[in-house]
Image: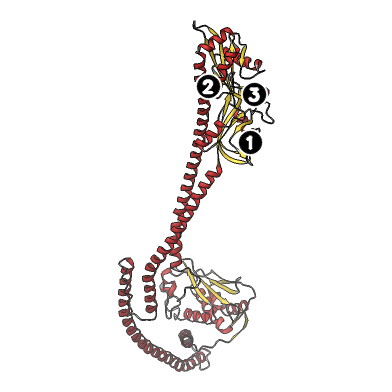
Amino acid sequence: MAIPNKKKLGTKLLFYSLINVLIPIMLFGFVVTDTLNNILDDKAQSEVTTGISSLEQAINLKITEISITSNYITTTPGIIKGINERDKEELLLRINHFKSVSDADFVGIIDKDGKLITSTANDVNFEIEEISKELFKNNIESSFEVISSDTAYLIDNTSKIEGVDKALSIVVLKPIFDDNNQYIGSIIAIDILNNNFHMINDVKKITGSDATLFLGNKRITTSITHDGKKQVGTEVSSLVWDYIQTGNDYKGTTEVLGVSYITIYRPIYNSKNELIGMMFVGSPQTYAAVAKNEIKEKIIIIAILCILLSVITSTYSNYRIKKPIMDLKRGTEEFGKGNYEYKTNIKSGDELELLSNSFDKMAEKIAISNKELEKRALELEEKNTELKKLDDLKSDLIAIVSHEIRTPLTSIKGYVELVLDEAVGKINNSQRKCLTTARENVVRLNRLISSMLDLSKLAKGELEMHREEINIKKTIDEVIDDLKPISAEKNINITLEIDDIIINADKDRMKQVFINLIENAIKFSPENEIIEIKGKEEYHGDVSITVKDNGEGIPKDKLEKVFDRFYQADLSPKRKGKGTGLGLAVCKSIIQAHGGSIWVKSEIGKGCTFYIVLPKNIDN
């Protein structure tokens, strides 16, 4: 049987299983991806840090090579002799050999006065002499220095870069001493770094990262190419250059000529400790991005496989879980059809098997109980039929007896009234009192018979209600007028607060109800009291009426019984013999026959309040 508008258990189990798989996979994927991304970023940053160290080592190696060669040549007799004799030819021969061995771009000999004796390049005396004096003064043997592009071009004609009017160079200065250890001059070697791609390319081969040297904020040598051209002469971003001017390394991700790089920039200073440029090593993020994408793809594939495996295992598990549940469901359906002999026979080895066994045992017990109930129901039906017959017989007997008694009572009442009227002769006061008592008892007995007949007809549904549109206020007014003689005897004032409300009801029966209620209120109220009758139309269309007295009241434990037949809530000897115990039972039957309800609230010493609710229209 289909379950309309409800999620089936299998769907729920599959959904929860997938949730249980997806959440850990998503968390795992997020943690792994984030961790690997951080590792890759750290690795890339570590690589560029290693790369910048490699670039520094390459530069230092170049300086070391030149320094070692310089140390050797400064001790050769030919150099010392050439300086002392100012033999330019001998010195030039020596320094050209030194230039070829050290791979320096420029080599020169300077005397002890700082004047250039000879060099491997012409017309560079002044600028070279100034640099040597600065280094000698500060006792610096090697440093980065900036020279003019013209001087650089005279030294190395490949150093020209468009838009760059200076050159960055490595300068090595070594003092020369004679045999008496007297300073006689210096040898200066310069390597121009503009367009010097050897070191840069070596670093890229070793580390796999791009490298660049800057003069100021402009690239003078780089491994970065665009359309096959080295990107010398281009500028670094102002963000990086501004940061480098603080004297710190710049690390992080930045755009280099439109490509995102993981980078490190390190400042370069001259012998005066002035910032003259910087070195750069960077790795394009495309490599890291490719690695990250590969990781993501693998994680996605693993996640999909896990989900598929979860769907398969969940489907199988759901089947194993659902089957005994469906067997139990089938058992409940058979149980609902009255087939208590059906057995679920679930052998799952778990709590469902225990539940199945309990269900089967319950079915057996219910089957036994059901048979017993059917037997008792049959017995009750037979007894109920007998009781109904007896009740019908009782009602018929009451009707017959009441009818037979009413005729002689009417005759007795007539004769008593004739005697009281002295139609058959004079009577004395004692006789009048006895006859008056007899007449009152005849009236009471007649009322009892009428009530018994009414109850009998109401019980059998034979009491006819002659409904018509009546003014409930006027109807109650008529009852109050009828009862004025007995209310006046106790000086009881009856107040009525109700609008002119029209209802559809049997007027005589309504008067019968209110006569009973008001007469009881008068009967059980002390002298000089007030009986309040109020009524109103409720918002839902019903009419509510209350009759409140200030009598002795009724105990709470007896309130439910006051509408029972022949019941009297006697509180004192004064009330004995005052009623038949049928009046309120008749009232309740009449009100219910009109589709209404009646109840009472009371407290000892505070009187009673009877509540009546009636529908305005017969349709209600």
The residue under label 1 is 231
Kind of element beneath mark 2: helix
Residue at image coords 31%, 82% = 372
Q: Nearer the viewer, residue 73 or 124?
A: 73
Q: Which sits earlier in the primary sequence, circle 2 or circle 3?
A: 2
Residue 561 rendering spot, x and y as whole percentages: 43, 75
Kind of element beneath mark 1: loop
- The kind of residue on which mark 2 rests is Ile
Mark 2 to mark 1 CA distance (whole Å): 28 Å
The residue under label 2 is 66
Residues at discs 2 and 3 in contact (Cβ within 8 Å): no
Residue 264 in view, yes or no: no
Is residue 560 left or right of 240 when viewed as pictured? left
Residue 544 in view, yes or no: yes
Q: Nearer the viewer, residue 104 or 60?
A: 104
Residue 41 rendering spot, x and y as whole percentages: 51, 41
Q: Nearer the viewer, residue 314 or 124?
A: 124
Mark 2 to mark 3 CA distance (whole Å): 18 Å
Q: Which sits earlier in the primary sequence, circle 2 or circle 1?
A: 2
Kind of element beneath mark 3: helix
Q: Answer above or below: position of 291 versus 172.
A: below
- Mark 1, Cα crowd under 10 Å, few <14 / some 14-19 / many 20+, is some
- Mark 2, Cα crowd under 10 Å, few <14 / some 14-19 / many 20+, is many
- The kind of residue on which mark 3 rests is Ala
**Rendered image: mark on residue 301:** none
Please state which of the two labelled residues, at mark 2 or mark 1, is closer to the viewer.
2
Mark 3 to mark 1 CA distance (whole Å): 20 Å
